[in-house]
Amino acid sequence: MQSPRRVRELGVVVGTLPTGSLNAITDVPGVRVGQTTITGDGLNTGVTAIVPDGWEATLPAAVAVGNGYGKLIGTTQVDELGVIETPILLTGTLSTFRVADAFLTWLLDRDPRATSLNPIVGETNDGHLSDIRRRPITPAHVHAALDTASPALPTEGCAGAGTGTAALGFKAGIGTASRVLPTPAPPSARAASAAPPAGGAGGYTVGALVQANFSGVLTVLGRPIPAEPIEADGNSCMIVVATDLPLDSRQLGRLARRAIFAMARVGSDYAPGSGDYAIAFTTSRTPSVADRDLRTPFQAVTESVEEALLNSLTMARTTTGFRHTVRAVPHDRIERSV
């Protein structure tokens, strides 16, 4: 029996940029995460809510699609307008629409005059470990995830929308990580404003949260750790990237694409039945970063997503579900690979 441990506790250090204090998406100022977990009686599923401050007035955002075999509600309006106007929710595939409806009720309760809202709900298929056809998520589960969202370190592994997911042959789930940019701001952003940036350690922060549920061969710092393949229905990955960098929606799209690229670093095979999506948003509404200054933010995204994916695995526990048992990755195999 092994206890869940983050990948850094196993001696794996991804990349060269420093992490935030929590090494989580919640290191980005104003970003909170809430989760509802459902287990027992053939169920392993839940809801994960990413709630940024200021969403009511819209925030710049973009969506990238690696492979569109999935259900991601609200994407066309994000593409059209370049903003999100709600938090972001994640869940299991067949519960996507029930979650969206309950989410809409929560939003309408907060704006009695609203006649148009664009809830964003993503999913991966947890039917390997949960009786997905029962669609067990209720409005109470959705509202609890939103109402309890916190700036603390989110629970990783078998939690929320990751309770029933598996990746790279092992039990996976929710994972998160962050990076702090090594300078207070890119040169072009410093020239645009004399005000100090709002990010951690005097600089800006990039954070990622993943719902990992995809196939391939687990690869840790370039070394493969093969497992028995899992014959699961649907293999996908949802990635949410948050930052306080002053970027526009086009630049956030570039970050979102790098998030999907980062899946390859841990061994994704980008299977035909995989829905691989990334949503990137910023809590800043005053874009002032030039494209030539995106090299380090790109690095921050790929490092954060790679480490978040590894955390989703090393923080998970062996789980017996509706049809199968999926084992956690043995930590000693990771430690031997370093």
Image: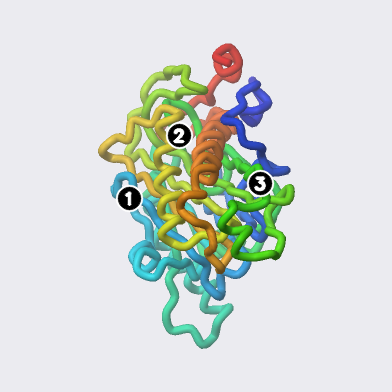
Give the numbered dot on residue 183: 3
> Whole-percent x and y of residue 140?
57, 63
- Name above or below for residue 271 compared with residue 122: above
Can you see residue 322?
A: no
Mark 2 neighbour density, 10 Å: few (under 14) some (14–19) many (20 or more)? many
Q: Cα distance, mark 2 to mark 1?
A: 16 Å
User: Camera-side residue: 12 or 215?
Assistant: 12
Residue 11 - label: none
Seen in the image, is 233 located left or right of residue 136? left
Would you say the residues marked 3 and 2 are in contact, meaning their CB atoms lie under 8 Å apart? no
Percent x, y of residue 33: 62, 54
Gap between marks 3 and 2, in whole Å? 37 Å
Give the quadrant of the C terminus: top right
Query: Which amino acid does the dot numbered 2 rest on?
Result: Ala
User: What SS does tag 1 mark?
Assistant: loop
Q: Nearer the viewer, residue 294 or 56?
A: 294
| Mark seen at residue 166 | 2
Give the structural element (helix, strand or loop) at label 2: strand
Q: Which quadrant would residue 174 be assigned to in this image?
A: top right
User: What residue appears at the point 65 percent right and 22 percent down from the top-left corner?
Assistant: 10
Of marks 3 and 2, which one's residue comes earlier in the chain?
2
Q: Can you tell which of label 3 and label 2 is closer to the viewer?
A: 3
Residue at x 49%, y 65% (from the top left corner): 60
Name the front one of labels 3 and 1.
Answer: 3
User: Who comes first in sequence, dot 2 or dot 1?
Assistant: 1
Image: 7 above or below 132 = above
Classify 112 as above or below 301.
below
> Of the numbered discs in the image, which one, if any, rests on residue 70?
1
